[in-house]
Image (cartoon, rainbow, N blue to C red):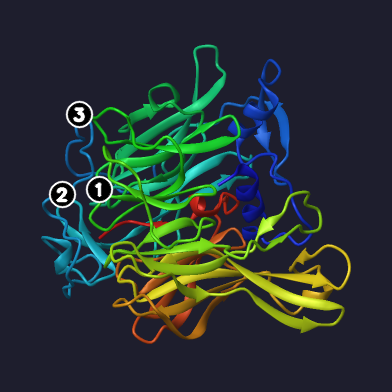
Amino acid sequence: MKKRVVGVLGCVLLMLSTGCSDECVDQFDCRREKGDPAEGQEWFCNSDEKCEQRPIVELPLEPDAGEADAGVPDAGVPDAGEPDAGVDGGGQGTGGKGEACTTSADCTSSLRCEGAPSTCQAMWVAVTGRDDGGTSKALVMRFDTPGITSLTEGSADSRYPRWSPGGTHVSFVQGAVDSSGKKVAGELTVRDVPLVAGQSVVVADGGSGDTESFRSTEWEPGAAIAYVRQNASQRSGISTVAPGASVAQVTTTGAFPDWSRDGSTLAYNVTEEGLLTVKPGGSPTPVANADKSSEQPHYNRANEQLLYLANPAGELETFEGESLPTSLFRLYNIDVTGGGQPQLVADVTTESSTGGDVKSFIAAPTWAPDGSWAAYVRAYYFKPTSGKPVLCGSLVSPCQSRPGNVIFLKRINPADGTASGDEVRIADDGTLPSFSPDGRYIAFIKGGQLQIQQLDPAAGTLVNAPVVHPKAGFTLQTGDSDDHRPRWQPR
């Protein structure tokens, strides 16, 4: 995917109603675009996504709000992500929060077994936030309890936290500086969970990773962390690295990697080629019958179906305040093993309105783990009879009564991948939905805060009011599309 398209989708996900610019997402974008800052200054990506310089300020060391490990920290490098012997990815018991357990199968489905002595505890959700000073931080929080823990110790910026398959480690991209004090590409870092103060391992940096920035990182259910390499404004080519191992180049082109359920295969997209799959060490294979416009593939954890966005009609809109067009995506599903045909899950829409039409397209899709539901964002905009279209928002008079973004669910038949039934409305003005491992909760970001909505997975109906996590000094980020999606700790 080209950088500009990522920026435009970021604008949609941020629900800006008057257009936006993607000059920067973080400090690294500013350095790439504008060079080194002045002496004693550092680049800062402000709330308008514009690059500014500010004096370098040393921040105090942040205390670790996570749980202390009752045992001794590992003396060496974390493992490659294999589940610990005491962690079971499936099964459901009756153990409640705080009750003793041997494996996660002893706990109710929303809890996992951890600690020493082992007890049933709520799963963590990992996100990227930005503090009041503009510094990005990789964060974790219990899904059911307000309270935020930074994965970075000290003043370094960080982003894109990802879980190992067993949920006992978490990776994130942490800012780094060279010998002269200049910011460089950053380091792909891994920490143990429960968190241990002073325990972290760098598994790759910009040099060993052959990248100016680690983008679109994905870990579980793969044994290695996959990421997209970036050089200047071009993001293309996938590499992997497992803790304790060397970086391996998997592809020379492509973006948006996603691991299959057994962690053996990556699905990804190449601009103007569509979807492909590849086993590390093997050759890429195009996904038959997927349109060349297809991108952002997602596997579920039950079968070999891929959820993805595509624009087979080539429909584009250039929104007010933008100079380049946005692709009007539809949502599809396809079985990558049987040579099946694409199944339409969610289409673009058009409704007549005074002076024009209110339209929508699809963004930020994801699966329920068992493949029974697809979640996605429907992004609305107003297209006047003359003039440029405008993304809907509170200040756009033709859309005043309509949110800019709405999260929906759509029922999917795991047997054949077909969609059925009406859309189930989950949240207005929310974005980046993410299912819990048991499919009973869906996390999303709204107004810079994490919200957790309980679901009845059989009926798709909402249960109780959502749990809203206070910002606690951090505004959760959405502008980097799927890179900023909340990630649930595996069970």
Distance between the Cα atoms at labels 3 and 1?
A: 15 Å
Nearest to the observer: residue 327 or residue 381: 327
What residue is disc 3 on?
76
Residue 46 visible, this orientation: yes
| Residue displayed at 40% across by 59% down | 298
Residue 50 on image: x %, y %: 73, 39
In-image side of 300 versus 379 (left or right): left
What residue is disc 2 on?
84
| Residue displayed at 66% across by 34% down | 44
Q: Is residue 7 above or below residue 315?
A: above
Nearest to the observer: residue 463 or residue 210: 210
Distance between the Cα atoms at labels 2 and 3?
A: 16 Å
Instruction: Give the numbered dot on residue 240.
Output: none
Q: Amino acid at mark 3?
A: Gly
Residue 341 placement: quadrant: bottom left
What residue is disc 1 on?
168
Mark 3: which secondary structure? loop
Q: Amino acid at mark 2?
A: Asp
User: In which quadrant of the rendered image does the C terminus lie?
Assistant: bottom left
- Tell me, yes or no, whether the two marked residues, 3 and 1, touch with CB atoms within 8 Å: no
| Residue displayed at 59% across by 29% down | 232
Mark 2: which secondary structure? loop
Residue 433 on image: x %, y %: 48, 65
